[in-house]
């Protein structure tokens, strides 16, 4: 426990000046949403439907900001992370299910990070050996957090703050230098939902809101007692056909018109992978100890998720090739989105609890926004499940095995996870916190 907890200070930026201590968590939160895999899936969704889903993407971003803000507030006000409070306020069975969801979210984030870097290397260097790139990626982005955890906290914290800031600057400069010549459509259109768009809608939802980050960031901010939200920019295109790996290669060649831009991309890939890997290590410790009640040594948090993600990525790269890795990047956000409806409920309930948050509990207006954000995630999943069960869209036929395309996630698994998550969300929606029940009992005893 202590070995992993010591990483929270390096992760947040334990620097001597208050500005660095403030920027640490802010950059950590921001960089967790800027890895290359998330960028690719956003491009894929935008290329299929253009601006038809732009308003929903905006709502997803606002919901992500709200969830991250509330998670940070919970950690700062209660001086406990979200997993600790869930352990106190829910039964053990509920905590185990929440832990399974957070753990699955953590693994999919590892998949996205590794597969995204591999695809990025291929797009830049046109490498035909994905196995070598996977091994190189895993060693670089996973050994660096472990090495930093053995260093002085202040030095490690300053390095992470500088690395995050440098990566963020490179990301912005990369866009400015490349300067893609794509006209901007100023006519914002209302959402046009269909069976075909349900897939992309889930991809965008899972890209913008990540479950295990609720637990990770509520733990990290306790070191600093400060917080700041995040935003995620989504790249959109006007193609009507589904983008594939070769389309992505052509898109990169068009976007990176400057020879400096690919180098900037590689820097962003490595450092963002380092930040994602480090946050996953902290999240793994928080989830295992506070939700499962299992105390694991430091090296397990470093190795277990990484090795599993590495083996899975190598398998897909060997069997299906780079196209399979690209499809894996599409599947991971869908899994993330399927876990969201039930995972946001503890965040909203705890932040609105007077007994836990005191005078810092959210206002009635914010409670309404939380309810709307929950409905947004819930109805998005319901639309997706309805299309999976009864639809006849192209991606549904692919999922059912009616086409020759490779199946990365079995149809029955998608149905079980989706229906189980929706059912668990409805169960949590009617399950009060233990502190709320105790408060109601005390109020009744006083009146009686």
Image: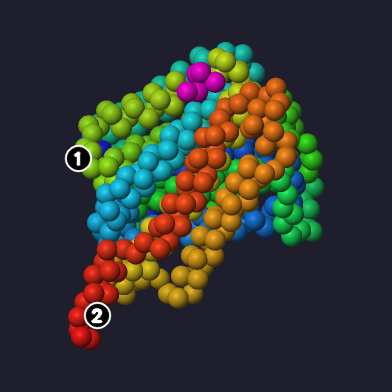
Q: Is residue 216 left or right of residue 355?
A: right
Q: Which residue is mark 2?
A: 443
- Front residue of 144/187: it is 187
Q: Residue at x 61, y 29 (%)?
A: 327
> Which labelled disc corresponds to residue 2?
1
> Which labelled disc corresponds to residue 271?
none
Secondary structure under the numbered disc 2 in the rendered image: helix
* Residue 205: image location, x then y, percent: 57, 48
Q: Is residue 143 left or right of residue 204?
A: left
Eyeballing the image, is 51 above or below 40? below
The outermost residue toward the front is 390
Residue 224 sits in which quadrant?
Answer: bottom left
Provide the major secondary structure of the magenta segment.
helix
Q: Residue at x 60, y 23 (%)?
A: 324
Packing grade of label 1 (10 A; few <14, some 14-19, many >=20) is few
Give the mark nearest the N terminus, 1 or 2.
1
Q: Is residue 428 left or right of residue 265?
A: left
Secondary structure under the numbered disc 1 in the rendered image: helix
Packing grade of label 2 (10 A; few <14, some 14-19, many >=20) is few
What range is drawn magenta here?
312-316
The reply to whether residue 205 is visible in this rendering is yes
């Amino acid at each position: 426990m202590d070995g992993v907890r010591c990483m929270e200070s390096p992760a947040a930026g334990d620097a001597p000046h208050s500005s660095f201590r403030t920027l640490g968590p802010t950059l950590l939160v921001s960089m967790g949403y800027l890895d290359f895999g998330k960028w690719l899936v956003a491009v894929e969704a935008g290329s299929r439907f253009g601006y038809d889903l732009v308003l929903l993407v905006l709502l997803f971003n606002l919901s992500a900001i709200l969830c991250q803000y509330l998670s940070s507030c919970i950690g700062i006000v209660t001086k406990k992370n979200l997993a600790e409070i869930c352990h106190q306020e829910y039964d053990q069975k509920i905590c185990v299910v929440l832990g399974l969801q957070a753990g699955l979210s953590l693994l999919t984030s590892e998949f996205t990070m590794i597969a995204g870097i591999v695809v990025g290397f291929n797009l830049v260097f046109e490498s035909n050996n994905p196995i070598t790139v996977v091994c190189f990626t895993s060693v670089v982005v996973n050994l660096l957090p472990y090495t930093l955890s053995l260093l002085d906290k202040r030095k490690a914290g300053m390095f992470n703050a500088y690395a995050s800031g440098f990566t963020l600057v490179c990301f912005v400069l990369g866009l400015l230098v490349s300067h893609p010549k794509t006209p901007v459509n100023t006519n914002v259109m209302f959402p046009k939902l269909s069976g075909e768009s349900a897939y992309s809608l889930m991809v965008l939802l899972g890209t913008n809101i990540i479950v295990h980050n609720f637990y990770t960031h509520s733990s990290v901010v306790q070191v600093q007692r400060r917080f700041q939200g995040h935003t995620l920019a989504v790249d959109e295109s006007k193609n009507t056909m589904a983008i594939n790996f070769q389309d992505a290669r052509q898109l990169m060649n068009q976007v990176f018109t400057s020879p400096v831009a690919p180098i900037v991309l590689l820097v962003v890939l490595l450092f963002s992978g380092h930040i994602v890997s480090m946050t996953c290590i902290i999240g793994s410790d928080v989830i295992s100890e506070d939700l499962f009640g299992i105390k694991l040594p430091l090296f397990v948090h470093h190795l277990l998720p990484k090795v599993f993600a590495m083996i899975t990525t190598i398998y897909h790269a060997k069997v299906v090739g780079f196209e399979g890795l690209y499809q894996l990047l599409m599947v991971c956000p869908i899994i993330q989105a399927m876990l969201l409806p039930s995972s946001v409920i503890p965040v909203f309930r705890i932040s609105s609890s007077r007994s836990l948050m005191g005078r810092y509990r959210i206002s009635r207006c914010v409670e309404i926004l939380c309810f709307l954000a929950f409905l947004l995630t819930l109805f998005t999943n319901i639309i997706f499940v309805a299309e999976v069960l009864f639809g006849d869209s192209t991606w549904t036929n692919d999922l059912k095995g009616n086409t020759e395309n490779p199946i990365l996630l079995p149809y029955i698994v998608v149905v079980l996870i989706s229906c189980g998550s929706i059912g668990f969300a409805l169960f949590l929606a009617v399950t009060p916190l233990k502190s709320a029940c105790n408060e109601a009992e005390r109020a009744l005893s006083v009146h009686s």
